Amino acid sequence: MKIALLGYGKMGQTIEKIAIERGHEIVLRKDEFNTYEGLSDADVAIDFSIPAVAVTNISSCFHANVPVVSGTTGWLDRYDEMVALCEEKKGAFLSSSNFSLGVNIFFELNEYLAKMISKFDSYRVDMEEIHHTQKLDAPSGTAISLAKGVIENSNYTNWTLDKPKENEIQIEALRIADVPGTHTVTYHSTVDEIEIKHTAHNRDGFALGAVIAAEWIAGKQGVFAMKDVLDLK
């Protein structure tokens, strides 16, 4: 399979290593210094860029009729716009805040726990996420996905980085050097607490998941999620 890498930072380079190990060819390594030449030759594109260029990258894929998998976060206020463009161009699109198999299982566990605990008003939930100091957005897209998972299965209505109101989930976002990603969801009561946590040891799990998603989406049409790739529905 021919892959275009849109974003060639540490994640892009890790994706390249794993893709080549799995027998794929890289036909474009897009960074701020080169063009999209080679994109139309790709069977699929993987976008791990920055929020400021993600929409341009994804749009370029749709116009070139190339399926695109995006792991960039911090731009999702324009997600519906990209979905509409994908449908207009009859393209294929998969955006995820996190491609790690473990994290996607963690998402499912988080939703199940939220649904169970929503029956008991003695518990209050908060979250903590820790990432490396180069991460540009806060909270992380993964933390936002976790918060949405709780909101959809409880009486919470919003998340905040500030002091929370009654129906808000507080997310604490910490930036510490060389931390790939740690996410903790904690339910507190006056008598105990329940905590679930996912800790990434390196970038390889994210990169492998992105390559697996790219392999899965090649040749397809529509808008998908990691639940489709991993058959977690």
Image (cartoon, helix red, strand yellow):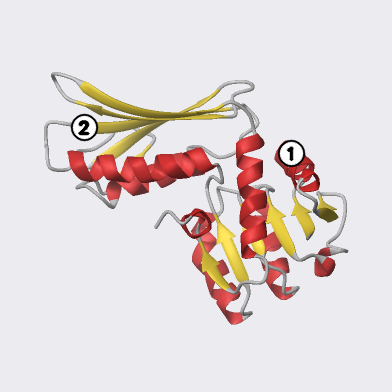
Residue 55 visible in image:
no
Q: Nearer the viewer, mark 1 or mark 2?
A: 1
* Quadrant in which the N terminus appears: bottom right
Residue type pointed to by label 1: Thr
Under mark 2, the amino acid is: Arg
For label 1, the crowd category at 10 Å Cα-Cα, with few meaning under 14, some 14 to 19 and many 20 or more, is: some
Q: Is residue 46 left or right of residue 164?
A: right
Spatial CA distance of label 1 from label 2 is 38 Å
Residue 179's x, y, as percent? 59, 24
Q: Position of residue 201 (x, y in %)?
A: 59, 26
Q: Residue at x 83, y 53 (%)?
A: 26
Q: Residue at x 21, y 32 (%)?
A: 124
Disc 2 element: strand
How many residues crowd mark 2 within 10 Å: few (<14), some (14–19), many (20+)? many
Mark linked to residue 212:
none
In the visual, does 217 lie left or right of 158? right
Name the image quarter holding residue 220: bottom right
Q: Residue beneath label 1, please? A: 14
Q: Which quadrant is home to the C terminus?
A: bottom left
Which mark is first along the chain, 2 or 1? 1
User: Which residue corresponds to mark 2?
Assistant: 124
